[in-house]
Image: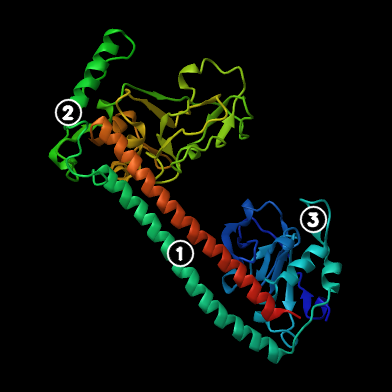
């Protein structure tokens, strides 16, 4: 039967009025359905000639139909508006069960119809309505359609149960990672009474060495003398640490910090070798993403002191998204050597007897996150800000240098184990999706 036998195009024109509220809808690709996008005043809507639709209609995007951008309009989107790029159809339920049709549109057969009925260049193909409606589908009787829908519901109940379990397993792996990070910070990844060559090292000696090094650099006028940080109060200590560790502040174990500047930059990322300033998104995932940058003109004033280098530990100082200020990352890979810090990022320089990765672990642990959470966002309603002084005040559970290295190495092995588990679970999810498509195709096959 040709599609036009059971789909009837519905076009109800509407002129958008500035002072009237209108519902707008979103069609997601890959058959992810239709949902209410927002409700806005007509004054903010650019296209004034649109169409009104109602719930229960079949709606598709003429641009993205071949990518699965179609579905049944839900009740919440009743009386919504659409532009001419979307087509709405009434389904003749005397011929076809609307649930069956919704499932059929998620089959390879329907995707192929949309592909065949689309024409144009690769990235700008549009669905041709006449070609689409003239296509034939093998349509079972209404009775068989309802049976197939029942079979699909039974199958989907089982497959959803598997998906729920896989998602639960991914959540457990996420919690395991956080637990391991916290164990590392508390010294639980090392055997008790670990020694270096038979001698028990103490972090207090390490602090004295760092203090002496800073005083030498100040005397040589290589760094500026800073205001002493206050001692850590008992109420600032959230957990016990091994006896040869010590609590200190981040500012006590750093030599210097550098913040970037504000630049007028292009939204396009820098090409290889071109000057670029990093965005906060380059930092906030915990992994340095160098492509998250904005290109700059080559005539920028001297920027040599804020160029990013491999091995840098960078913190996000400010972010428009809640919970991202305070995040940090280590620059492990760097192809473009002309990337620089922005005014929303800060880099700390450490002496050779501080393992920057250990500091990063402390910062991204549950303990580190709670420190920034307690700071709040009092400086701005639109931007979460953390000052350099607040970074300096972060209490650090510091082990001796060899213990820092051992902790980092042990944690790395355990996190790789978590990565392997996560990869296996995601492979199962992908297999589950393939199985779903295969079963649907078999149930709906002509």
Q: Tag 2 or tag 1, which sits nearer the N-term?
A: 1
Tag 2: Cα neighbours inside 10 Å, few (<14), some, or many (≥20)? some
Image height of 34 relative to 209, above or below: below
Label 2 element class: helix
Tag 1: Cα neighbours inside 10 Å, few (<14), some, or many (≥20)? some
Q: Quadrant of residue 434?
A: bottom right
User: Which coloring applies here?
Assistant: rainbow
* Residue 433 coordinates in the image, percent (x, y): 59, 67
Q: Residue at x 64, y 89 (%)?
A: 147
Q: Residue furthest top?
A: 220
Which of labels 2 and 3 is toward the front? 2
Q: Are marks 2 and 3 in contact (CB under 8 Å)?
A: no
Label 2 vs label 3: CA separation?
A: 68 Å
Label 1 vs label 2: CA separation?
A: 45 Å
Q: Nearer the viewer, residue 339 or 277?
A: 339
Q: Pointer 2: what residue? A: 204
Q: Pointer 1: what residue? A: 167
* Residue 253 coordinates in the image, percent (x, y): 27, 26
Label 1 element class: helix
Quadrant (top left, top right, bottom left, bottom right) of the N terminus: bottom right
Quadrant (top left, top right, bottom left, bottom right) of the C terminus: bottom right
Residue 404 visible here = yes
Q: Pointer 3: what residue? A: 125
Q: Residue at x 40, y 27 (%)?
A: 347
Q: Nearer the viewer, residue 345 or 415?
A: 415
Which of labels 1 and 2 is toward the front? 2
Q: Residue at x 39, y 55 (%)?
A: 174
């Amino acid at each position: 039967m040709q599609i036009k036998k059971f789909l009837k195009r519905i076009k109800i024109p509407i002129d958008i009025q500035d002072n009237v509220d209108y519902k707008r809808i979103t069609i997601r690709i890959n058959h992810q359905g239709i949902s209410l996008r927002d409700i806005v005043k007509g004054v903010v809507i650019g296209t004034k000639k649109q169409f009104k639709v109602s719930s229960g209609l079949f709606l598709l995007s003429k641009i993205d139909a071949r990518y699965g951008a179609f579905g049944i309009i839900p009740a919440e989107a009743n009386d919504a508006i659409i532009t001419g790029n979307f087509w709405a159809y009434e389904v003749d339920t005397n011929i076809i069960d609307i649930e069956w049709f919704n499932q059929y549109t998620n089959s390879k057969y329907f995707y192929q119809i949309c592909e065949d009925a689309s024409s144009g260049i690769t990235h700008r193909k549009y669905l041709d309505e006449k070609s689409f409606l003239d296509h034939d589908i093998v349509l079972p009787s209404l009775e068989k359609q309802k049976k197939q829908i029942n079979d699909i519901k039974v199958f989907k109940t089982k497959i959803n149960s598997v998906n729920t379990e896989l998602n639960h397993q991914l959540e457990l792996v996420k919690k395991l990672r956080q637990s391991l990070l916290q164990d590392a910070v508390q010294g639980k990844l090392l055997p008790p009474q670990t020694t270096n060559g038979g001698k028990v090292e103490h972090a207090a000696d390490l602090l004295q060495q760092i203090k002496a090094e800073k005083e030498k650099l100040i005397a040589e006028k290589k760094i500026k003398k800073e205001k002493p940080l206050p001692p850590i109060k008992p109420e600032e200590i959230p957990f016990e640490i091994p006896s040869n560790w010590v609590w200190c502040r981040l500012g006590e174990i750093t030599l210097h910090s550098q913040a970037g500047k504000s630049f007028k930059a292009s939204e396009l990322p820098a090409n290889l070798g071109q000057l670029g300033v990093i965005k906060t998104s380059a930092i906030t995932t915990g992994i340095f993403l160098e492509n998250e940058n904005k290109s700059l003109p080559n005539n920028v004033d001297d920027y040599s002191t804020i160029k990013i280098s491999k091995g840098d530990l960078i913190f996000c100082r400010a972010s428009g998204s809640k919970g991202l200020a305070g995040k940090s990352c280590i620059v492990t890979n760097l192809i473009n050597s002309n990337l620089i810090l922005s005014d929303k990022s800060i880099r700390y320089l450490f002496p050779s007897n501080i393992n920057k990765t250990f500091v990063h672990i402390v910062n991204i642990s549950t303990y580190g996150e709670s420190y920034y959470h307690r700071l709040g966002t009092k400086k701005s309603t639109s931007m979460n800000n953390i000052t350099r002084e607040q970074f300096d005040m972060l209490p650090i559970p510091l082990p001796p240098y060899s213990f820092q290295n051992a902790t980092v190495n042990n944690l790395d092995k355990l996190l790789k184990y978590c990565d392997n588990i996560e990869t296996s679970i995601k492979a199962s999810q992908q297999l589950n999706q393939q199985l779903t498509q295969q079963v649907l195709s078999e149930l709906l096959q002509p």
